[in-house]
Amino acid sequence: MSDIKKGLAGVIADETAISKVNPETNTLLYRGYPVQELAATQPFEAVAYLLWHGELPDESQLAELRATERRHRHLAPEVKAVVDLQPASAHPMDELRTAVSALGAMDTAGTDNVLEAVGTAEQNLERSIRLFAALPALVAYGQRRRRGLDPIEPRDDLAYAANFLWMTFGEDPDDAVVDAFNRSMILYAEHSFNASTFTARVITSTLSDLYSAVVGAIGALKGPLHGGANEAVLHILEEIGSAAEVGAWLDAALAEKRKIMGFGHRVYKRGDSRVPTMKAALDSLVAHYDRPDVAELYETLEREFVARKGIYPNLDYPSGPAYNLIGFDTVTFTPLFVAARITGWTAHIMEQQASNALIRPLSAYSGPDERHVEGYVPDEAAAEVAERPEEPVG
């Protein structure tokens, strides 16, 4: 039997210059920069530029990116129509998947063949910026539609994070909320060969287009073992109710062998390095909204779970209650992840295209040995193929 790596655990599939976790410091690095430093000092637009270009922008480069992003914030009527065709009860990840597919069909319409749709490096950077600009409008439009509210048009006088909140809630956001939200977007922007990013790279490796790769990534991110975990965290906190109920709830959950979402990570073995930054953002929101009960429940569950299992929180644990305090519906949490991760996904798509090889792993077969249908007589062509020598590799 071959040495099978279930889930590709420990398998190095390719190299990337976009991000890594430094094992010496347990720190996530974007193009070499610790993510906590970026979250503390940079607007999300600058981090997007970093992921796409490899360096932080200077003032003129950032201004140019912001100007381009603001030009593409408005949703075309055709895209709104596609969203409106979805049932109001549809999960917003399904809305986003369909809307991005529509954006791709509109953008690549008129190409003579599928290879033309793949696009040049310059075209795919432009497509990346357009998706970066459109996703906040799509997420905001979806939440307001589910609440029976009219959509709110974007504002050109607001930076990315503030405009996102404006389109969702229709109010000028406070600085503390903008800062916490901006930090969350940066923390979620990129994380190497995670499931959705690897999905995007696999699709890209077939010479499919950027939009198809993003649609596939959205499908991967929807799963509760990946992007859907932040939704699950909020459901758990709501189920517990208060800090006083944590002990009894955790006793029952562990006895039932329930998976406690928001704890543990495939990559981090000493705790997720992004958590302290997001926890600080959550603390600022707790103070802003005067909700000490949220902090008490959060900290009690963390303390009790770590004491019993020795497993630490991941980024989804503080981000769930943070998004809830800001006012996002629970089903909107994973679409927020999409709006952030579009930067990392598209950076990886462009990196894959620049040095492409079809991703096609092998499998270890565990079915029946070769057997034959009764009465079948092979023709000469089939027999000739079976007798050919193996083709040379390369």
Image (tube, rainbow, N blue to C red):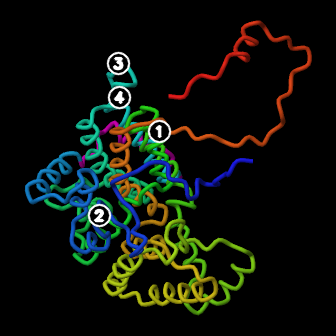
Considering every residue shown, the one lying at the far right of the view is: 374
**Residue hosting label 3:** 112
Q: What is the magenta range?
A: 73-89
Q: Which residue is mark 4?
A: 117
* Proximity of marks 4 and 2: CB atoms separated by less than 8 Å: no
Judge left or right: residue 184 versus residue 133. Answer: right
301, above or below 52, in the image: below
Earlier-in-chain disc, 1 versus 4? 4
Q: Are marks 3 and 2 in contact (CB under 8 Å)?
A: no
Q: Earlier in the sequence, mark 3 or mark 4?
A: 3
Task: Give the Cα separation between the discs numbered 4 and 2.
Answer: 32 Å
Circle 1 is placed at which residue position? 203
Marks 3 and 2, Cα distance to the nearest angstrom? Answer: 40 Å
Given residues 27 and 95, the one toward you in this image is 27
Q: Nearer the viewer, mark 4 or mark 2?
A: 2
Q: Amino acid at mark 1?
A: Ile
Q: Are marks 3 and 4 in contact (CB under 8 Å)?
A: no
State the residue lying farthest toward the left: 60
Task: Compute the Cα span from label 3 to label 1.
Answer: 20 Å
For label 2, the residue is 32
Q: Give the mark, 3 or 1, whose residue is nearer the N terminus.
A: 3
| Foreground pick, 255 / 268 | 268
Q: Nearer the viewer, residue 196 or 368?
A: 368
Q: Secondary structure at mark 1?
A: helix
